[in-house]
Amino acid sequence: MKQFLNKITASALALLVLFSTLSFTIQKHYCGDFLVDISFTGVTHCCSMKMNTSNKVVKKNCCKDETHQFEGQDELQLSSGENITLNNQQFLMAFLFAYKELFLESYPKNGLRKVFPPPEIRQNYQIIYQSFLI
């Protein structure tokens, strides 16, 4: 159980570091008020609307692109053990020893236990002797 808990904790911390340093960009392409294309990895594809420039009437471009960029951490802060004082060291050691004792299973040195498992019942004596409590 302890190893399983350690593996879950290590995986969760690794995922936390991964997602805190992850950066990505979302690009959206709108034609009018309608979302036409969305891209998480590259450039969005433009719609096939053509600009009408006949008779010197220039229509405004109804298409627009939006880009949302989410940036993660660029540098991780590495802590050094130089700024730990003697009081902090004593507290840390006491905490670690007390926490370690929670996961240790202690058995008597002679191997005897006070609690014995119940014996296996091979036959149901109530049915054999037909003595039932009413």
Image (spheres, grey):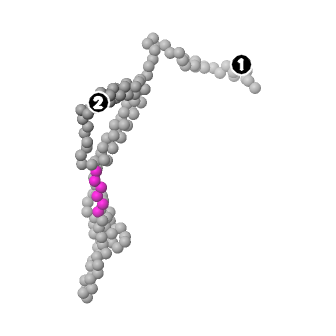
Marks 2, 1: nearer the viewer? 2
Residue drawn at 30 percent across, 55 percent down? 70
Quadrant for residue 97, please give it.
top left
Q: Does residue 73 lie above or below 43 as drawn?
A: above
Q: Which mark is residue 129?
A: 1
Q: What amino acid type should be assigned to the residue bearing mark 1?
A: Tyr
Q: Is residue 104 magenta?
A: no
> Does the magenta stretch mainly form a helix, a strand or a loop?
strand
Decide which of tag 2 and tag 1 comes sooner along the chain: 2
Q: Residues within 10 Å of mark 1 (few under 14, many from 20)?
A: few
Residue 98 visible in rendering: yes
- Residue 85: which numbered mark, if any? 2
Amino acid type, callout 2 = Thr
User: Which one is in front, 47 or 107?
Assistant: 107
Q: In this picture, which residue range is highlighted in magenta?
A: 67-72
Q: Position of residue 118 (x, y in %)?
A: 57, 19
